[in-house]
Structures are given as structure tokens and as C-alpha cells.
Image (tube, helix red, strand yellow):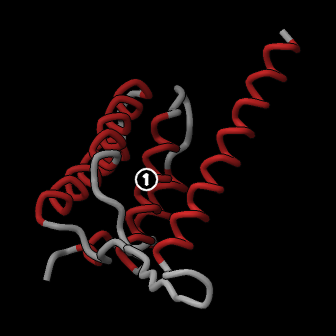
Amino acid sequence: MRTLIVIASGAILIAASATAAAHTASTHAQSGGVGGSITWTPNTPPPLPDQADWRRIQDAAGLRHLALEKHRTAHFRSFSAALGLSELNVIRPLGPGRCQTSVKFLYDNLLDLENASPGENWNPLRRLVAKGPSIRACAPR
């Protein structure tokens, strides 16, 4: 078992160094030799979602609302949260900003609800959601 781990680790290190060497060679060739310059612009995602992703964010927030209603069973809360998480898992990445913050907050709330167990007090989370960032920051303009 130990030998297999050592062999696999060695193969990964060799592949990584070969990739780095190939990248260095291609960069050197693209730059036109020594003293050339390469312009690199990061591909940052948009700060707001498109219409389809906005709908998914709204659906996930609606499922969080359903899960936080009083007199719901732990199983219902967990299932509703799992559905909401599956909606958020398919949206495209968002750039930094208020929308990204509110989606992260929504995602964290749904993770808490997914692990619901019988007898838990959900009033603190209800208050936190009421005071937390709104998903309206993600509304397309």
C-alpha cells in the first residue's frame, strides 16, 4: 500500500513538472524570445446572474423560506434544503459584489437546513435570515 502511494505521488510530481516545463517553453516561444511581453487578462465572471440563474436563485430562496416555516418536520427541512442546494449548484460563478455575498449567505443557510434534526430550534436562523443580505441584490437590471 505504501509503495503504491509513493509511486502515485511520484507520477503526479513528474506530470506536474512536465506541464510546468511545457508551459514555460510555450510562453517563451509566444513572447518572441527573451525580453518579450505577454499580456494576460483575467477572465472575471459577471457580478450579476443572467435571467436563468436569477430564477434559480429565487427558487432556492423560496425553498429556504419553505424550510424555515414553523411546524415543518426535520425531514421536510432537509429535503427542501437539498433541493435548494441543487438549484444553486448549477448557476454560473458570480463576480465579487453584493450578489455574490447574498448567494453565499443563502448557500450557507441551506447547508444548515440540510443537516436538520428533530427538535432543533430554528428561531435564531429565522432572525438571521430576516436581517441578512437580500437576494434582491442579484436582480437583473
Q: Is residue 7 left or right of residue 15?
A: right
Depth check: give the residue in front, 36 or 13. 36
Q: In which quadrant will I find the C terminus?
A: bottom left
Snapshot quadrant of residue 134: bottom left
Q: Is residue 51 above or below residue 140?
A: above
Label 1 amino acid? Answer: Tyr
Q: Is residue 21 above or below residue 51?
A: above
Q: In which quadrant will I find the N terminus?
A: top right
Q: Which element carries disc 1, helix, strand or loop?
A: helix
Residue drawn at x 40%, y 69% as measured from the top left: 102
Residue 138 placement (x, y as % from top left):
26, 73
Residue drawn at x 55%, y 30% as measured from the top left: 119
Q: What residue is disc 1 on?
A: 107
Residue drawn at x 40%, y 58% as measured from the top left: 106
Snapshot quadrant of residue 51: bottom left
Depth check: give the residue in front, 12 or 54. 12
Snapshot quadrant of residue 80: top left
Residue 22 placement (x, y as % from top left):
58, 55
Residue drawn at x 56%, y 36% as measured from the top left: 120
Q: Is residue 106 left or right of residue 80?
A: right
Depth check: give the residue in front, 92 or 76. 92
Q: Is residue 2 above or below residue 129?
A: above
Residue 82 placement (x, y as % from top left):
37, 34
Q: Is residue 135 above or below residue 35?
A: above
Q: Is residue 35 left or right of residue 99?
A: right
